[in-house]
Amino acid sequence: MSKEIQNMGAGSERIFSGKAESKPVQELYNETQKLFSDEIRKRLLPNREYAIADIGSFKGELLKQVCDKLSEYRLKGVAVDINQNVLGDNIFEARIVGKAEQLPFEDESVDIEIMRYVLQWNYPENQKNILKEISRTIKEFALIEHVGAENEEPDEWRRRNDKLFDGSSVSRLKRGEHFFSSRNEIEQWMNEEGITFERIAERIIENGSEVYVERFDIDRAEMDKIKNILGDKDFFTKTTWIIFPKKRF
């Protein structure tokens, strides 16, 4: 059975392009390109061509921002997304329709892979498979950014947020497959799979409800519902990792 294509939200393209308005959305989406480009510049010399694949690329917004910041590098961008319709509008010529949990690449065939906020829109087993696939296919390293549950009470955090995604309170937020794993859970999975990684950044994004408002064009009354449901769990934990290929195990 093919995986359900989720509603990305009316404000997605604008937000993904770095044009976020509210502080929480800016903290989620406007900092990734610098963090990723700084890590690439730190670890690779600009003396040859590198293939860089964006997993869950949408229309290529993040990949373009990273490549623009690394103009001294010869980067060959490859866009990978499950949604063929949005991939058709992707600005990169190399486009591949594919699932993150079944990447269409040979072992150690892609120099760099980047992925932002894909894991949480998959159930745990698929999240584990995505991490394994990334580790399998990279030649140099991958950069992964994740937004998830708090580490202290992940189940309670998820219970509150899951109330939003059943669509009963705010219909525009109805989602299918999702699981907001915590940083601890993801790192435990990577350790169990023998995946070598480093955590390179983490921060709490307060007022996470504003992310839903801006991305899904939520009105004030619906925003109040969201805030009431989330209560003191109105935040995200944003974590960034670098993952290394199996040859470095």
Image (tube, rainbow, N blue to C red):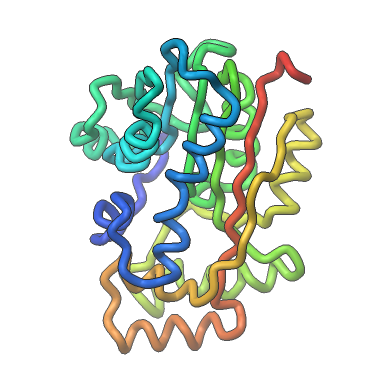
* Location of residue 62 in the rendering, given as x and y in whole percent from the top left corner: 36, 41
Does the rendering let one see residue 219?
A: yes
Q: Is residue 131 above or below residue 118?
A: above
Residue 55 versus residue 168 in the image, above or below: above
Q: Give the left or right position of residue 81, taking residue 47 as reference.
A: left
Q: Residue 165's spot in the image, x, y percent?
A: 45, 67
The one nearer the camera, 21 or 214, is 21
Q: Quadrant of the C terminus?
A: top right
Tell me the residue at 51%/83% (across/down). Answer: 229
Residue at the spot x=34%, y=83% of the render? 222
Residue displayed at 65% across by 37% down: 128
Q: Is residue 8 visible?
A: no
Q: Is residue 242 left or right of residue 173?
A: right
- Single out the residue that lies furthest toward the left: 89
- Of 25 and 173, which appears nearest the observer? 25
Relative horizontal placement of residue 139, taking residue 11 as reference (left or right): right
Q: Residue placed at 40% from the left, 65% from the top?
A: 25
The image quadrant where one finds the N terminus is top left
Q: Nearer the viewer, residue 244 or 47?
A: 47
Q: Position of residue 84 (x, y in %)?
A: 26, 33
Q: Is residue 38 above or below residue 228?
A: above
Residue 33, percent from left and from top: 43, 44
Number of numbered discs: 0
